Image: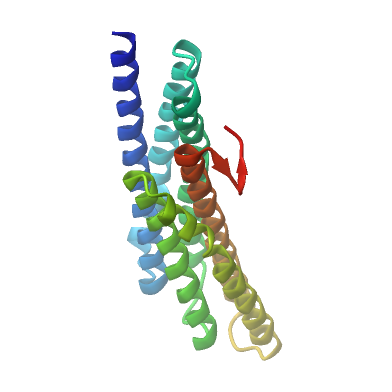
Amino acid sequence: MIRTIFDHELSLLDAQMLVMASSMEEAVVSAIKVMEERDADLAERVIAGDDDIDRQEREIESLCLKLLLTQQPVAGDLRHVSSALKMVGDMERIGDQAADVCETMLGIDGPLDARLSGHLRRMAEKACAMVHNAVAAFVERDVEKARSVMGSDDEVDALFDKVKTDVVAAIQHDADPASSLMEALMAAKYLERIADHAQNVAEWVEYALTGRYKGDSIG
């Protein structure tokens, strides 16, 4: 009977995690659309929707703590709950960064240099793919998919370096308003952070499934 109750609560945890992951991924996809189309209305919806993601994080944290305190899970069950507790923090931060991307894009006046725009677009696409695959790895319990996400962060970091180079060159040549260039740089920084948090989610998925975290066996 006790195990049946625990299994039910684990299923509830997974369901809540899935809802939050979906909300977070939708925010990222919408933020990318804001970058491409400068859709102010959509940007405002993403920013407003961040409060709901924050609420979901608090509810999941509360459930995780309840499970840890009342059920005292061990082995795989403990990994299941503790990794969920870690993952929701990263998912909440991804939601924050998606809202931040929207805010910065609202501050950009006019089109950006084509090279800079191209690098930003590729950063956005790769960061979005990392988020999608991290969520899919969690939903499908797919450790190989999680590991594929971990191998993608370096590509985003390399593109971020290119964006920084583009911004410096544009400032030197007065190609775009300096304020818009700084906003573009901040948007790139938020995309880089989204990728970092997506990698973190993938690492916690691997831990939940295998007991290994960043290459080490920890339970």
Q: Position of residue 106 (x, y in %)?
A: 47, 65
Q: Is residue 172 above or below residue 67?
A: below
Up the image or down, 133 lies above or below 110; here it is: above
| Quadrant position of the C terminus in the picture | top right
- Asked whether residue 124 is in view, the answer is yes
Counting the numbered discs, the total is: 0
**Image: 145 above or below 112:** above
Q: x%, y% of residue 146?
A: 45, 53
Q: Position of residue 92 (x, y in %)?
A: 48, 43
Q: Quadrant of the N terminus?
A: top left
- Closest to the observer: 168 or 128? 128
User: Which of the two residues, 31 or 2, is positioned nearer the viewer here?
Assistant: 2
- Residue drawn 35% across and 17% down? 6
Question: What residue occupies the far top of the structure in this picture?
Answer: 1
* Residue 158 occupies quadrant: bottom right
Q: How is the image coloured?
A: rainbow
**Residue at figure coordinates x 46%, y 11% from the top left:** 70
Judge left or right: residue 179 versus residue 46: right
Question: Which residue sits furthest bottom?
Answer: 173
Horizontal and vertical percent for residue 173? 67, 91
Q: Is residue 116 above or below residue 137?
A: below
- Looking at the image, which is closer to me, 196 or 2? 2
What residue is drawn where x is 45% and y is 22%? 62
Residue 45 visible? The answer is: no
Residue at (37, 37) in percent of width and height = 17
